[in-house]
Amino acid sequence: MKQACALVAGALCSAVFARTEPSLEYRYLDGLAAPKRWAPSECEVTVSPHRAWEHPAACMRIPVDFHAGEKAYPIGWPRMYLTLNAEEQGWSDYDRFEFQLFTESSREKLPSRPVTFHLYDAQGQKKLIVLEQAALKDWRTVSVNLSDIGLAGPVARLGFNINESDYSDKDWIAFHVGGFRLARATAPHVTELRAVTPALFCDCRVLPIELVIEGPAAQLASGIPVQLRTGTRTVLTRTLPVTRGRQTLYVPLDTSPLTPGAYTLTVNPDAGGSGPEAAISVTTTPWQ
Amino acid sequence: MTTRFCLALAVAAASALHAAPSIFDLGTADSPLHTGAQRVTEKGGEHAAWESSLPPAARAHPVQRDWVENTHTRRKDPPASYQTELTCDHIASDTPATLTLAVPSGTYRLILLCGRAGGRAEQVWDICATTEDGADARATFAGPHELRALTLDATTGTRGIRLDLTTRSRWVLNAVIAVPAAEWEAAQRDTVDPLLRDALLLPREVLASWKIVPRPDTAPEPAWSERQRQDGVAVYARPWCEPVWPDHKPRQHELDAPVRAFASPGEYEPLTFTLHALRAVTNVDVRLSALVCTNGRTRVELPAENIALRSVRYMFVRPNYNAFNTAYRAPDILMPWQPQPIPRGENLRLWLTVRVGHGQPAGLYHGRATVTADHTVLEVPLTLRVLPITLLKDRSLVYGQYYRHPLPNSERAPDAFSRAWWQRKAEAEHMDMREHGMNTVVLGLGGWLKDGRWQFTFDTLQRNLDLARGVGFDKPFVCSFPCSALYRKHMNNADMGSHLSQIKMPPDAFFDELTWMVQTIDAEARRRQWPELLYYPVDEPSTSPDSVAFMTRVMAAIKKVPSVRTYITADPEHEPFAPLRPYVDIWCCQPFALGREAVLADMKARGVEYWCYPNHISGENDHTPTIGARMTYGFGFWQSGYRCLIPWIYQSMAGDPWSYLDASTSDFFNRTADDGTPIPVTLWEAYREGIDDHRYLFTLETAIARAEAAGRRESASRAREVVARIVAEMRVQPKYKQDGLWSAGTFDAWRWALAEQILALQAEEQHP
């Protein structure tokens, strides 16, 4: 009976979480593309001739010069920073911060660490993200899940920099950045399931999984169903409380040990049992 | 007579006063006096008197707050340690002395501040303070910056409180705070703790510029059982490589979770559990039983003496070693166990390290930790499975440490006790490194010009090599040598600057003499039958054209000496370093910068080696990436193709080694106990566990090769599938730190999966 209730509850809950890409709402921060808002060093910021998602972009042009720049550090870090206005803050109602990046250069190939994006809180704590996705003459989307930023306070300042040591003397490089926006899903949606526990002792109490959930926090109250299967046999079904953003969930396991073998964990399964899934190897236990 | 009469009057006068804490500020006659304190000079004071065969000496240092320009780095540095009015001055001596303090009669708790004496780095301070009742408190520590607070209880005699101060080298005393016992609780809160925070962490006006940013706790409050509420303490278990933050709540499933581990003979294995205080606990003590296995009819013990009991100390840490103004409390140091309180809502993590002897029979062992928390007694079951596996180690790999060698301090020490202390520190640390899997250490050869001739510290290097080889270090030694001194000779005493920031190309004669220098060192090394030295002229050169041009000629000059190898700390992926490639034998970079295929191909093609100094898990910028450290040293290193892990550094100390917020850079990694032996940090234990993961992998790969050679293909294939599954589930990264890692428990599950295959192949081999 208990299991039936759990299954029914799971079926009801599954209707809350979207199984296809939900619609997204955006709040564009076009002010971030204004060149005069940026404080550049060893680079130049101008209005970009390009548009990103039909929104304005700024161009950060860097002439790499191993002899110029700061006297103590001639091979330095060309950079630019921007402080958010009060009305540009308050990101907590959103899931992601996004913008587009278009790169041009005198080089034929970008280094493995082409440019770094910075987010700071008011205390100066920072999150640095290397934009490895940058590609020459191509637009790439930069999408940062806000729960991954890990700052104690709200984001107050943004920045970009390159390491000149990653480039060659006399290279030039231009980054067009624009379409700055905050994004949020209109319905709860699992955007990522990470198999953080590919191996597990059969007598463990819980199975940790890592999820990213986007969507309105108010709609998450009923939790999310997860299912553990081996082959076609469902071993357990649970509904777990969740929050918005990246989180580790601890799936409670039965008190009796699992049979060692290969398992699949599915999050928010549909009627056919499909959904984001992760493979788990359950091992014997050394302590019996 | 006069002194005794004066003190008697002073005691009488003191009795008439309100019985508040008495603060005695020891120092010179004109050194800053803490507000409300009584001055005590080397001659005594209005309420204090000395007795000694030789008068002690008083000294004072300025209370400095200004930052000062560092000409090498061209940045401003804060004071190495912060003085307060209480700590800026002191009285010290190498002779015993008795200090009598006139206080109203009664029982007192005394806080003695000892340290911050300035002076020589080689001086080891040793203080033993004994009261008339026979209570004593001791401290032994080295150098000019460390400060200790000793606590002891005393009852007044006829003349007040008498403190006998004895030493094996020099004692130092800055202040005594005497608190009537009945007033301890209020005085601790209102007077003592603030003073100690000023003295031991940062002065309040400096601390005001720092923001303490606690790590947020997102876990819901668990449902406490009735028993836990009654006890006021909850016991819980979390995998050792996952941090326990000071004031975080346990997760529901962790409460009363089993405390268990498995290990093979020869291993050290952590077992941890944590006490969460549901109400303030004034005193916790822990006793361990032996671990006992009853293999059928046989009873086998793993004695309690083989289990080191420590507790995790939380330290205020910086987010990066050279960052300022932001700090948070993080789990860090594994202190030798001492009974202690737990504030309400906080955690006390007990860290047991079991040493499984080489002859320990296999089996399932059980024991217990008996925890006494005030009036509550809890039994925590412990389980250890010892496996019948002889673990191998890939002896071709190099595990090293950057290291500040204590032996030169021993040579320069001002007294016999200090000399012996530094010697013991060096020996104990080498043993510790060996027991944590190391097989080399970074050394240096000193040199200077005297009357136009170079003098080298060959004998010092000899002693350092002898010590290292004595504990079994059998790999080449990275060795710096006096390249910067040579540069100053040719460049009119100019400094090369940090990362060669001030470098100018020296004349050809510099490079010729550099070749001669390396030839001379190499000849001496052969004469003395030294192991291979890897020549390390400059650390972390920058990619500026001047730096690269200089380094290219330096490395070329070294390579003129046949058969010597060069070592550089630089990222070969940086294009500006391309001119160096023909002259560098060992590239040592911070991450696993190049991928496995590129590394293996280049090593095969050119005979070079790729090493790594993984400072992202050395404590330099985060004291808690224990999962990342285990991954770096274990599965990550295994997959990388690199040949060595050699992080900076075994112990980094700047200013007071127990305050991480003073000085230009934070302290990090292993600490030192009063007897000179090392106190580990959690990251250091993670290195060893990663090395052990690697040993299980290597042992299995060896067993697979043996099975395949013997035609046992089916079992070999099953074992290979497990290894392949691990590789498939790894997210290979240049740096393993926080993101993209397995959960803590997965590492043990993989290790067990490897062990199972080893056991299966072993069984098949023994019983074909």
Image: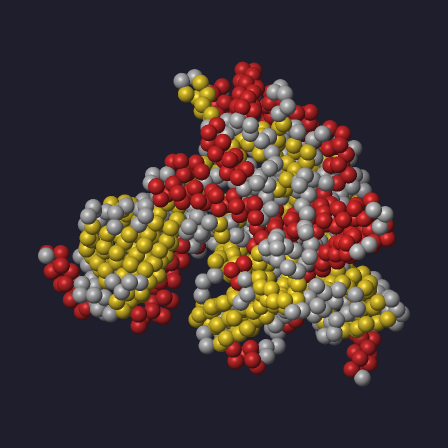
Q: Position of residue B590 (x, y in %)?
A: 63, 40
**Exactly how many numbered labels are in the figure?**
0
Instruction: Find residue B583 and report its image quarter.
Output: top right
The structure residue drawn at horizontal position 20% and vertical position 53%, both measured from the top left corner, is B50
**Quadrant in the picture for the N terminus of chain A:** bottom right
The structure residue drawn at horizontal position 82% and vertical position 81%, both measured from the top left corner, is A4
**Quadrant in the picture for the C terminus of chain A:** bottom right
Question: In the figure, B91 relative to B480: above or below?
Answer: below
Q: Position of residue B49 (x, y in %)?
A: 19, 55
The structure residue drawn at horizontal position 79% and vertical position 46%, both measured from the top left corner, is B706
Note whether residue A61 is visible.
yes
Q: Position of residue B71 (x, y in %)?
A: 46, 33
Note whether residue B493 is visible.
no
Which residue occupies the foreground of this view, A235 or B590?
A235
Q: Which residue is most to the bottom?
A: A1
Which residue occupies the foreground of this view, B575 or A287?
A287
Q: Position of residue B159 (x, y in %)?
A: 18, 63
Question: In the figure, B227 relative to B317: above or below?
Answer: below
Instruction: Find residue B177 and report its image quarter.
Output: bottom left
Q: Which residue is most to the left?
A: B1
Instruction: Find residue A227 and report its image quarter.
Output: bottom right
The colour scheme used to paint the residues is secondary structure
Left or right of A255: which side holds B442? left
The structure residue drawn at horizontal position 68% and vertical position 36%, both measured from the top left corner, is B610
